[in-house]
Image: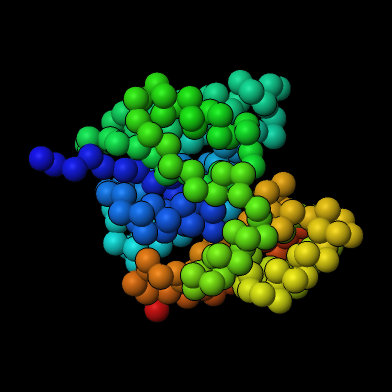
């Protein structure tokens, strides 16, 4: 009998990458990664550097399905309606996959807005949801990622206390200690759950080869991002 397949919602960032890693460690049969790209802001999906998801998928060795979403959360009048609209794009993609779907993995940590919609989506499809980060302590999660050998790069920042020096920085023990101090002083979330920072996983145990980046920083005085000029597998 053929084993049912899992699909991992995947952006290349730390949370979705950790959910995938945990799924593989637990023996789930992940046959597809699925990335939703958005040109504009999104309530449901990680936006920065998702164009590198294909490179990460190549290193991981699992086929990637890429979906284009025409989202612009910034101009949305109703957040709930916008979130529902964004999930419709994902639901259509999942229904069109050529797999016998068992479930979906997701990297949600604290967002009830996102998780409730993904859970409802899974209910409609009659499949399971694997969300190993959900409501876990962010400090413990960050340490688990580091202990497992995840190399996590910060690709975007938008919070008081996070200056241009954080762009491109590796989320290592020193960075985590600095984030602890910024959490106490400014309320910066340890894992960036409030949009304080966004990440890209450039190496991990489930990746055969690391992602090597060339980039420049763009900074407007209060926020910034990496402009990636080159990326390849090492």
Q: Residue at x 56, y 29 (%)?
A: 116
Residue 168 visible in this rendered orientation of the protein = no
Quadrant where the N terminus sits is top left
**Location of residue 143 in the rendering, given as x and y in whole percent from the top left corner:** 61, 67
Q: Residue at x 66, y 75 (%)?
A: 173
- Residue most toward the right? 185
**Location of residue 123 in the rendering, given as x and y in whole percent from the top left corner:** 41, 24
Q: How is the image coloured?
A: rainbow
Rendered image quadrant of residue 128? top left
Rendered image quadrant of residue 141? bottom right
Please state which of residues 44 and 139 is positioned toward the viewer in this rendering.
139
Q: Residue at x 61, y 44 (%)?
A: 135
Horizontal arrangement in the rendering, residue 5 relative to residue 148 (left or right): left
Quadrant where the C terminus sits is bottom left
Q: Residue at x 40, y 70 (%)?
A: 205
Q: How many marks?
A: 0
Residue 121 visible in this rendered orientation of the protein = yes
Q: Is residue 166 above or below residue 193?
A: below
Rendered image quadrant of residue 207? bottom left
**Location of residue 76 in the rendering, given as x and y in whole percent from the top left corner:** 67, 26
Please state which of residues 40 and 176 is positioned toward the viewer in this rendering.
176
Please state which of residues 123 and 38 is positioned toward the viewer in this rendering.
123
Horizontal arrangement in the rendering, residue 103 relative to residue 39 (left or right): left
Horizontal arrangement in the rendering, residue 1 relative to residue 121 (left or right): left
């Amino acid at each position: 009998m053929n084993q049912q397949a899992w699909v991992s919602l995947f952006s290349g960032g730390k949370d979705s990458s950790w959910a995938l890693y945990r799924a593989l460690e637990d023996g789930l049969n992940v046959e597809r990664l699925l990335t939703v790209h958005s040109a504009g802001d999104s309530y449901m999906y990680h936006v920065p550097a998702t164009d590198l998801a294909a490179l990460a998928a190549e290193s991981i060795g699992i086929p990637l399905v890429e979906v284009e979403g025409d989202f612009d959360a910034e101009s949305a009048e109703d957040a709930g309606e916008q979130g529902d609209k964004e999930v419709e794009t994902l639901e259509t993609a999942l229904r069109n996959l050529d797999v016998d779907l068992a479930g979906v993995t997701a990297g949600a940590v604290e967002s009830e807005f996102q998780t409730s919609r993904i859970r409802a989506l899974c209910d409609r499809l009659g499949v399971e949801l694997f969300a190993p980060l959900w409501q876990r302590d962010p400090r413990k999660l960050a340490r688990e990622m580091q202990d497992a050998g995840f190399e996590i790069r910060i690709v975007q920042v938008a919070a008081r206390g996070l200056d241009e020096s954080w762009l491109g920085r590796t989320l290592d023990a020193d960075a985590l200690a600095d984030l602890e101090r910024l959490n106490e002083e400014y309320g910066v979330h340890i894992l960036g759950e409030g949009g304080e920072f966004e990440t890209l996983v450039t190496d991990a145990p489930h990746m055969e080869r690391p992602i090597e980046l060339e980039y420049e920083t763009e900074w407007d005085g209060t926020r910034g991002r990496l402009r990636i000029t080159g990326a390849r597998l090492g």
